[in-house]
Image (tube, rainbow, N blue to C red):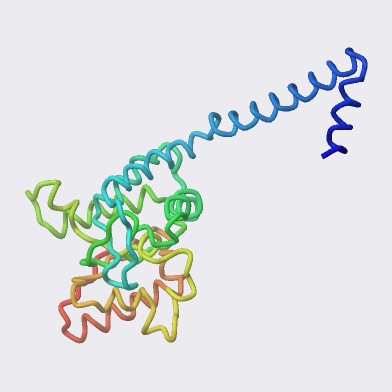
């Protein structure tokens, strides 16, 4: 309107050196904002770049992640877990699940708010893995290799043991719905119990260290108890350590 026109006229009547200074300041401010924006995009941390690359790989293998019922259908093959470990090995080093879950699993699943298994492509459980989150993830992966080779027998090819399906809580529960996964209406409706007592679950593998840390954890004791109940009940359940 006229008010706006008046403002333009008043600016245009400023001395040239003042008007030029205002324009230079505006251009400089715009340049700084643009530069900061590009820096935020171009200077991602090495871990963030790896997350972007791995997320793209997951998208190729499982383009449309869908939720599935909690419990036995949210297992992963040993190969899927080892692939993740190998891809992020330079960041994980000797760190445990207390690093892996918030820094790798959560960012990879944040968009979908699903379990990692659902994002990566789930399968039905064959072996239930009971472990202590404080173990080095590298040690957990070594134990998975031994389990796979033990299950399929000597002489079986790598492709076979990598396909053995394991249920591992870090990957198999929805980290955005932890309360529902752990309890729900009762312990019998927990993801742990449902997976452990599934007809497709052949046995439990407990990863022990020299300090027997898993035996100091309530959930590990819960898993061991129900594994023993299945063994003694003649349900074809095996316990490995």
When asked about the image quadrant of residue 181, the answer is bottom left
Is 28 on the left or on the right of 100, as rendered?
right
Instruction: Identify the residue at image location x=19%, y=77%.
Output: 199
Instruction: Count every numbered label the image shows and give the total.
Output: 0
Q: Position of residue 175 (x, y in %)?
A: 46, 63
Please tell me which residue lies in front, 171 or 48. 48
Q: Position of residue 160 (x, y in %)?
A: 12, 52
Please tell me which residue lies in front, 137 or 61. 61
Instruction: Identify the residue at image location x=22%, y=57%.
Output: 147
Is 126 on the left or on the right of 216, as rendered?
left
Q: Position of residue 38 (x, y in %)?
A: 58, 29
User: Against 18, is 116 above or below?
Assistant: below
As drawn, the residue found furthest toward the top would be 17
* Quadrant of the drawing holding the C terminus: bottom left
Instruction: Identify the residue at image location x=7%, y=49%.
Output: 155
Instruction: Identify the residue at image location x=80%, y=22%.
Output: 25
As drawn, the residue found furthest toward the front would be 2
Q: Position of residue 170 (x, y in %)?
A: 40, 61
User: Against 9, is 241 above or below?
Assistant: below
* Quadrant of the drawing holding the N terminus: top right
Please tell me which residue lies in front, 166 or 141. 166
């Amino acid at each position: 309107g006229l008010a706006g026109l008046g403002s333009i006229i008043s600016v245009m009547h400023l001395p040239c050196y003042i008007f030029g200074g205002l324009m230079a300041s505006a251009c400089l401010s715009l340049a700084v904002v643009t530069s900061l924006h590009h820096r935020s995009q171009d200077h991602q941390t090495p871990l963030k770049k790896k997350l972007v690359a791995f997320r793209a790989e997951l998208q190729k293998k499982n383009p449309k992640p869908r939720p599935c019922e909690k419990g036995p259908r949210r297992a992963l093959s040993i190969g899927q877990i080892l692939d993740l470990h190998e891809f992020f090995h330079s960041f994980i080093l000797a760190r445990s699940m207390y690093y892996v879950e918030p820094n790798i699993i959560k960012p990879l699943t944040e968009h979908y708010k699903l379990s990692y298994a659902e994002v990566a492509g789930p399968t039905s459980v064959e072996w239930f893995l009971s472990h202590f989150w404080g173990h080095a993830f590298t040690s957990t992966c070594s134990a998975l290799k031994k389990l796979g080779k033990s299950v399929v027998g000597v002489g079986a090819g790598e492709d076979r043991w990598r396909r053995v399906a394991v249920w591992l809580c870090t990957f198999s529960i929805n980290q955005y719905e932890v309360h529902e996964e752990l309890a729900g209406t009762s312990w019998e409706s927990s993801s742990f119990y449902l997976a452990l007592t599934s007809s497709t679950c052949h046995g439990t593998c407990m990863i022990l260290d020299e300090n027997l840390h898993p035996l100091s954890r309530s959930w590990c004791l819960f898993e061991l108890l129900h594994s023993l109940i299945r063994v003694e009940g003649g349900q074809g359940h095996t316990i490995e350590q």
